[in-house]
Amino acid sequence: MPVVPTRSFQDGISEFRNALRFVEKEGGLGTADNEEKFPSVSLQKLAEIGALSATLPVENGGLGLADSPAGMVALSELLRRAGRLSLALGRCLEGHINVVRLVSLYGSAHQRQLLAEYLRQDTLAGIWVTDGAPAVTLVQNGSEIRLAGQKGFASAVQAVGLALITARTEQGDTVMVLVPVGETARMGPGPGHLTGMSGSGTGSYDFTGVVVPADNIIGKPGDYLRQPEFSAGAWRGSAVALGGMDHLVGLLLEELRARDRASNPHQQVRIGEALILRETASMWVRRAAMAACNPHAETGETVALVNLARIAVEQAALALIPLVQRGLGVMAFVKGRPVEQVMRDLATYLRQPAPDETLTEAAGWFTEHPFPEDRT
Ligand SMILES: Cc1cc2nc3c(=O)[nH]c(=O)nc-3n(C[C@H](O)[C@H](O)[C@H](O)COP(=O)(O)OP(=O)(O)OC[C@H]3O[C@@H](n4cnc5c(N)ncnc54)[C@H](O)[C@@H]3O)c2cc1C
């Protein structure tokens, strides 16, 4: 059940939003780091204003941002601002928040407390589920579990201190396990050199031989895939992508103004279209965030709405990129210029799992059920 916001709860959220705006305005979040460099300075600044632990539930000392519409608006703002600054930063923060959410939903009171202790020490958490070769398995021996195998896409592999991973048991079930990480010898290059998002520090991590207490298993087998969270959590990634769109729209306007081309009628059409695309994405992100925290909706409806939002944001962002290229011409292709990097980062960031299924499953739901506004 969502927490009913109390006065002090709302004050906490307002203070947090003010702090976020303040550090951003003062340049305190830094500028986007060098493309290849992990955005550790910006992450540190976010940690200093309590952003890493603000996402915890109220009972664990956080602001419970995921527990009320007001909190979701603040969370959306945090993710959007992070994505605008750097999609790599947004990716790391989004993964961190995903871990908080899954442990809050499925973890025991002790596990939630343990996570809170890590976060209070400014530990960055990571959700590493995409397997490498071989995939991660676990064998339980009394009160311990022994892991084997690799995760192939591990964002912020060098910065994450605590990973929530999925592993396959001997019985063939998939379980979530919290694992302290950070051993350099276990880190590898991962998928190879991505054309975008290289600042996200995405590598691989070899869990072979790692032993953790069996208490570190979070929830029951199958909880990771449990709906609506499995799909609805995607709204947070869309909020980060929206931040990338903000950055791109800002750069388009800035460069057109600097070259005294912004008031040309053809460029005005492009500017108008870019603003429409950005606002379309923004409205979908808001809708998805509200759907994700609506306790009254059917699970299938929540999932379908967030899935539509994910694809709508993807389509809007993908339509924005050629508009910017057409508007700025070859200057949008000069390697290392911010606009060129943001386009590559955004195009890469948008590669989220199973987009075809995401759209068609949502369509399938609303073929059988009325859209919320169509209910009489
Ligand atoms: C920068 C970056 C950081 C990442 N960080 C992490 C991380 O920290 N942790 C983590 O776990 N993962 C991470 N990932 C991996 C990410 O979560 C996704 O797994 C990955 O991006 C999937 O993208 P894809 O386009 O290959 O998806 P796919 O699902 O492979 O989709 C590719 C295409 O194939 C289609 N398709 C999908 N399934 C089928 C099928 N069965 N049959 C036919 N067609 C199909 C899709 O619709 C789509 O058209 C990261 C990825 C990136 C790019």
Image: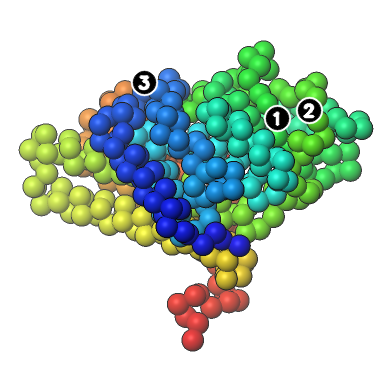
Q: Quadrant of residue 247?
A: top left
Residue 232, position as x, y percentages in the image: 56, 56
Asked if disc 1 and disc 2 are in contact, CB closer than 8 Å, the reply is yes
Quarter location, residue 80: top left
Q: Which residue position holds label 3?
A: 34
* Quadrant of res 208: top right
Q: Between residue 242 and residue 61, name the one nearer to us.
A: 61
Q: Would you say residue 130 is visible in this rendering?
A: no
Question: Residue lying furthest bottom in this view?
Answer: 376
In the picture of the structure, the residue carrying the numbered disc 1 is 179
Mark 3 or 1, nearer chain start:
3
Residue under the image location 76 percent in, 35 percent down:
216
- Residue at 7 percent of width and 38 percent of height: 260
Q: Secondary structure at mark 2?
A: strand
Amino acid identity at mark 3: Asn
Residue 68 tag number: none
